[in-house]
Image (tube, rainbow, N blue to C red):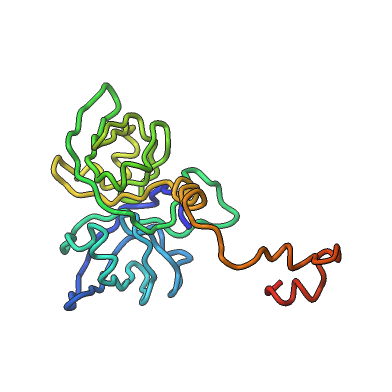
Amino acid sequence: MFTGIVEEVGTILQIDRGSKSSVLHIGGKLIFDDLKIGDSVAVNGVCLTVTTLSSNSFTADVMSETLSRSSLGTLTRNSPVNLERAMAANGRFGGHIVSGHIDGTGTIESIKKDDNAVWYSINASEKLMRYIVEKGSIAIDGISLTVARVTKNSFSVSIIPHTIKATILSTKGTGDIVNLENDIVGKYIERFLTAPPPESKDILQEAAPQGQGITKEFLAKYGY
């Protein structure tokens, strides 16, 4: 789990490309003090697992499904990438709940300066737009941002200079592809409202067929 608060901008040192998968070699400076093999790191918002580790670089496998759903397949050597370690239980929750599981990609339509802020307008598919609401949360390349405006086919965010300087947004231009992760809350609500009722009988009815209540045997049966 991540917060969408990018810790540093790292660099793609090397890419080992397979027929359907890749291995990314990623360099950085700030995230390595407690990083371990097996840890999760969000790379441009995509949750990847550290497979090898040195003092200032790590490798991560990227499977075919991830390449098809994200912009990681467009990375090249020396590409800058946003990096964030998984959220620590004792840390401040500065962004929103980010799973690192990309829903799809969007395309930057326009970038407009507005005094000290910059407006980014991003075009996205109808499948993604249904979960994007004004004043809601969105993760763009792993950056936790607030949606300021929504149209039928696009949305806009207003970004402060610090966020632009501290992330790869400063390298983006119109026409560039970005990874998008919708707020997970909306997806769960939709699932709860649209999922068909279970076919099996109500386990609570089974628990108390004659007013017996929930017993130790019942809890053990269902794994508690």
Residue 8, given in percent of the width and then of the height, sits at 35, 52
Total labels: the figure holds 0
Q: Is residue 77 left or right of residue 66?
A: left
- Classify the position of the C terminus by image quarter: bottom right
Residue 140, given in percent of the width and then of the height, sits at 32, 46
Q: Residue furthest top?
A: 115
Task: Name the residue rendered at 36%, 66% in the picture.
Answer: 48
Depth check: give the residue in front, 61 or 129. Answer: 129
Depth check: give the residue in front, 171 or 214. Answer: 214
The picture quadrant where one finds residue 150 is top left
Task: Name the residue rendered at 33%, 54% in the picture.
Answer: 103
Task: Name the residue rendered at 38%, 49% in the picture.
Answer: 6
The picture quadrant where one finds residue 172 is top left
Task: Name the residue rendered at 48%, 58% in the picture.
Answer: 1
Q: Residue furthest left?
A: 175
On screen, residue 157 above or below 29: above
Residue 176, given in percent of the width and then of the height, sits at 16, 47
Residue 129, given in percent of the width and then of the height, sits at 31, 42
